[in-house]
Amino acid sequence: MTESITITDNRTGESVEIPILNGGVDSGGWAKLLGNVWFSDDAFSHTAIGESSITQIVGAEGILRYRGYPIEQLALRSTYLEVAYLLLFGELPTPDQFDGWRDEITHHTYIHENFRKRFMESFRYDAHPMGVLVSSLAALSTYYPEAKDIEDPEVRMRQIVRLIAKVPTMAAAAHRFSIGMPFVYPDNDLDFTSNFLSMMFRVAEPRYHCHPAVRRALEILFILHADHSQNCSTTTARVVGSAHADPYSVVAAACAALYGPRHGGANEAVLAMLRDIGSYENVDPFIADVKAGKCRLMGFGHRVYKNYDPRARIIKEAADEVFQLAGRSPLLDIALKLEEVALADEYFISRRLYPNVDFYSGLIYEALKFPTNMFTVLFAIPRTAGWLAHWSEMLERSSRISRPRQLYVGHPERDYVPMAERTPSA
């Protein structure tokens, strides 16, 4: 028996039956029956923007899969570049495919000298690295005018490779500029993650040597942040891409959405909360204030997950080795106590408030010596692959330009009044 819903227009008595496919119902049946009556859904909480085969989230069960592969398996056994390949091409690469993919990425990490010196270094001396990255990504399209030919699959793939390769270079350059340090060129003998760390932190040593635990922790964080279905920035990429903008403009727009503190800045808010709590002994009073509505518990709860965020579990496990190397942060003890108390309290259990990915990621970034103004940039580097995977998938499905409707609640028709006859509005 086919699952379906039936909608009845009580004004006319007419009904329409719409099948439920892949957990959704097609809006065509609704439109055919009701005409100019629009479905009101603030923030698109219950609206699917389209079909995708990239990332599956089952929020009630705390499940996250890339192309069918559980995130737990990928975080344990894979690398970021392999995951990026999976997101873009739909399958894990063979050894030969991966060697070719890695070689392409490695040899596109450099950015044009004129672009770096005349554009990136023209920002104010203390410019926020994320602001520099957003602007630089948009400007990069002027260096690759052929990128506007989005109908050509080869041209599209060339830009995808360039973006995945160059975003870490641009991100590190934005950081170095913001602290008055000289630019560090990419080292093509290093792997993707180590190369980024080298461009971030190398000082005068001839070759940057990265501790395996540091490299692996960042690799896991990159894998976990590579995609997350139709979040704010990915939907932004899709909407801008539907206008057939070039991929540099698409990624710049997605980065701008990520720049907002309600999206990419959540882990920084967690660190600020932990510092405000101040000590292990203040956790219980803080929880009481949260329940009384006096303050917010940051890093708990998620729009999608109604269970423990699977990424939070993975990050929590990865944190142990990092803190053994970097030294245990006093904020970690506060975080662990906070999680313990909240998960045992019926107030949070009944509301299904569990730690999300942001609860521990900021602690790890801080332990790895990243400044807080780089946290959203660190989010943007791996998410570039996810944004481009959705952009490419959307173009291949020949999507229409995005054009949501609105419910007008303003003035009815009224006549123009000459200025001299107008009275002040309330």
Image (spheres, rainbow, N blue to C red):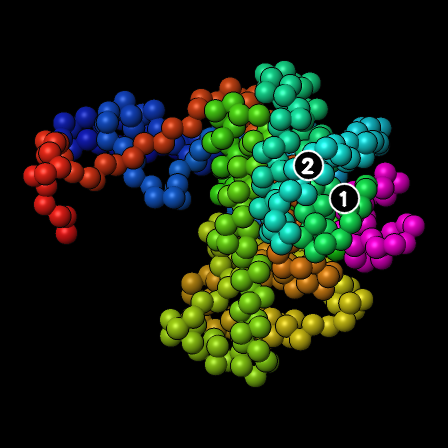
Q: Out of 114 and 29, give the one closest to the viewer.
A: 114
Quadrant into which the N terminus falls = top left
* Mark 2, other Cα within 10 Å: few <14 / some 14–19 / many ≥20: few
Q: Which element is circle 2 on?
A: helix
Ranked by sequence position, the earlier of labels 2 and 1 is 1
* x then y, percent, for residue 122: 64, 42
User: Contact, CB < 8 Å: mark 2 with mark 1?
Assistant: no
Name the residue beneath numbered marker 2. Answer: 118
Residue 152 vertical position relative to residue 169 in the rendered view, above or below: above
Reply above or below: 248 against 303. above
Residue name at image x 45 percent, y 67 percent? 296
Numbered badge on residue 79: 1
Label at residue 363 = none
Residue at figure coordinates x 58%, y 59% from the top left: 267
Task: Provide the residue span drawn in magenta.
Answer: 187-215
Task: Between residue 134 and residue 113, name the one nearer to us.
Answer: 113
